[in-house]
Every structure is written in structure tokens, then in C-alpha cells.
Amino acid sequence: MQQAPVPEIDENSDKGIGALFGQLRADASVFARAEVSYYKAQAGERASYARPGLALLAVGLAIACGALIALPIGVVLLLAPLIGTGLALFSVISVSLLLAALMLWAGGRRLRAALKKPEDR
């Protein structure tokens, strides 16, 4: 049976286990820094790409808030000649508060359910 060749050991490259672990730690540190730099660059590129979209969303949200404020005012102005200003204001506020209460109740219920384990929902 043929014996496997024994690799020659160069006495200049014989470092010992401590030196090998030191080199491993240094290599891992360089790798970790490179990964962090890569992810920072990637996040910065994505953020610069997303910035105009976020601005458009903010403007759209501001316009929607304005419309939601104008809607009940418009309904009050439409109902005022028919039922009077006071009753129109009371009606619109009552319906708005009822809708808000229903939405808050449903949203709170969903949040409480989301905090439970899936099998307890």
C-alpha cells in the first residue's frame, strides 16, 4: 500500500496556534468592517432614492387631512338651510364622533388580538 506524501514544513511559516487565532481575529474584524460599510452604503443609496417618494406621501397626507377637515364643514353648510345651523352642527359632530368611536373600538380590539398568541385569538 502506498503511503500519503507528508507535506514539508517550512520553519519560517510555523506560527503556532496563538498566531493563527490572532490572524483569524484580524481577518474577521476586517470582514465585519467591510460588511458594515457595505450595508451603510446600501442604506444610504436606498434612503436617497426614497426621499422624494416620502415627500410626495407627506404632501398627499396633508391634502387628505385638509379634505377630511373640509368635509364636515361642507356638510354642516349644506344641512344648515334645511334643519338650522345648530342642529346641522350637532348632527355632523354626533355622526363624526360615532364613526370615530367605532373605529377606535375596532382598532383597539385588533391591537389587543395582535398581542395575543395566535392560538388564543
Image (cartoon, grey):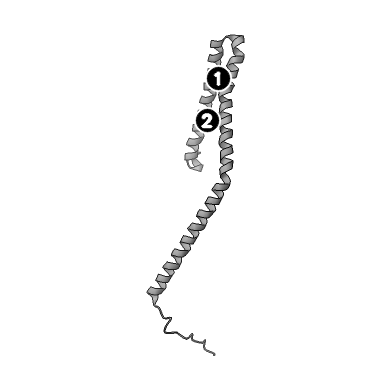
Q: Residue 117 location, x and y as percent? A: 48, 42
Bin the neighbour count of mark 2 within 10 Å (Cα to Cα): few under 14, some 14-19, many 20 and up.
few
- Residue type at mark 2 is Ala
Is residue 28 positioned above or below 60 on the image?
A: below
Identity of the residue furthest to the left in this view: 18
Residue nearer the viewer, 60 or 14: 60
Which image quadrant: the N terminus? bottom right
Residue placed under numbered mark 1 in the picture = 95
Residue placed under numbered mark 2 in the picture = 106
First of labels 2, 1 by sequence position: 1
> Is label 2 in a helix, a strand or a loop?
helix
Residue 59 quadrant: top right
Residue at x-position 48% and y-position 64%: 31
Residue 53 quadrant: top right
Residue at x-position 43% and y-position 69%: 24
Which label is found at residue 43? none
